[in-house]
Amino acid sequence: MQDGGRDARTWWVACGLLFVTAFGTNVPVPLLLVYRVELDLAASTLAAVFGVYALGLAPSLLFGGPASDRFGRVRVLLPAAVGAVGASLLFLGAGSALWLLFAARFVQGLASGAVFSVGSAWLQDLAGTAGAARAARAASVAQTAGFCIGPLVSGLLATYGPWPLTLPYLVHVALMVPAALAVLLVVGLGAPPSTGEPRGLLPRPGLDALGRRTFVRVVVPTAVCVYAFPSVSVTVLPLLLPGASGLVAFTGLLAALTLGTGTLVQPFAHRLGPRTAPVGAGIGALGFAAGTLAAAAPSIGTVAVAGILLGAGGGLCLNAGLTLVGRLAPASGRGAANGLFYTAAYLGFATPYLATAFVTVGELVWPLLALTAVTVTTATWLAVRTRARADTG
């Protein structure tokens, strides 16, 4: 870090903004079951509502990172934070209109994508290339903790508090506004980076030939695992328990277990080193296998175990991917590189839709079995590539 106390405060406000944004993105997760009843939605429509978030992410990730490389991190982060507040306010009317539910989820993706990619690049700037692992750990912990606590709070408020489709979003707004103000007070708007040459708004991370090969062969498959694992856990696995009482609260608890485990495994990433990605994918494969068992013989316990394994796998893959990006990308291209990483990661949000679109809830055992096989193959590929990188130095 660069300058003692001020940089320490900058570090914490960056982590805080990542946390609160991640908190908000999963507030709707346990409420999807309420929307399903209120709006009479099919399971595939429910998965589509969850997945439209990724459509908003795509332009935000692709262009937000390069914009921050050109104009500065904070000048992109603050408008994105305002967008996250706007998305939560849009959700206030979504209980009576499906189009508004889709629109709110889209805007949420548009805003949070910029915060995640630019915020991660900001931490990498503060830590430097030598601190890539530290920056990855901080970004991973901040995001997975937010992903975990958001649905837990939302599920409990929706089950036991008043205004189940209103109060959770107001809580997020109440957290998001001071988090954005803290960034403005500690850092201000900042100055545009002086790179010596103008940069465009297209994603050009500036990787060398070896870096590009590593990005495609290792970073991209690792990234897809990051959100494919927890998104299936929190949207598909609860459908296996249609008769369980308190299902909204259980979905919030399952999301907390899934994403909380993703936070708790972060210290192990340091010990695993370059093996973090294949180990994470392998644990995710075990999670899909447990989900397959739960589909064949529904059980709250088996669903919980599957969620914990999928959360651990996703958390390790997030750490592994961000660490590699921090080491591969030059400072002038970190925003673009993180944007491309998160773009690949959020492709995983299509997984719940693919798992539910072509089968009934009673036939989910088959797509879950297919996901197990695909993830075993991915883990094997990552292990081979990791060994090859180690052999070539």
Image: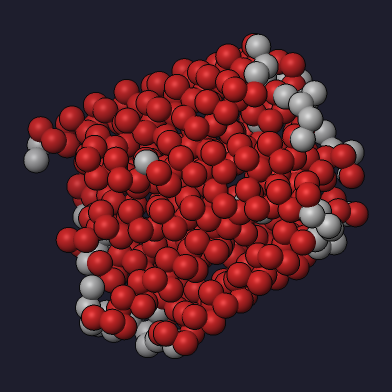
Q: Residue at x 17, y 37 (%)?
A: 389
Nearer the observer, 378 or 125 = 125
Whether residue 48 sits left or right of residue 74 in the image: it is right
Whether residue 5 sits left or right of residue 177 in the image: it is left
In this view of the protein, can residue 153 be seen by the observer?
A: yes
Question: How many numbered discs?
Answer: 0
Q: Residue at x 64, y 49 (%)?
A: 151
Whether residue 118 sits left or right of residue 164 in the image: it is left
Nearer the observer, 79 or 9 = 9
Nearer the observer, 24 or 190 = 24
Q: Position of residue 306 (x, y in %)?
A: 53, 26
Q: Residue at x 41, y 53 (%)?
A: 141
Q: Is residue 87 above or below residue 301?
A: below
Q: Position of residue 385 (x, y in %)?
A: 24, 32
Coloration of the structure image? secondary structure
Where on the picture, by quarter, is residue 340? bottom left
Q: Position of residue 193 (x, y in %)?
A: 32, 82
Tell me the quadrant of the picture where the N terminus can be found.
bottom left
Q: Position of residue 322 (x, y in %)?
A: 34, 52
Q: Is residue 63 above or below residue 249?
A: below
Farthest residue toward the top?
296
Q: Residue at x 37, y 88 (%)?
A: 191
In this view of the protein, can residue 200 be seen by the observer?
A: no
Where on the picture, by quarter, is residue 23? bottom right
Q: Is residue 222 above or below residue 57?
A: above
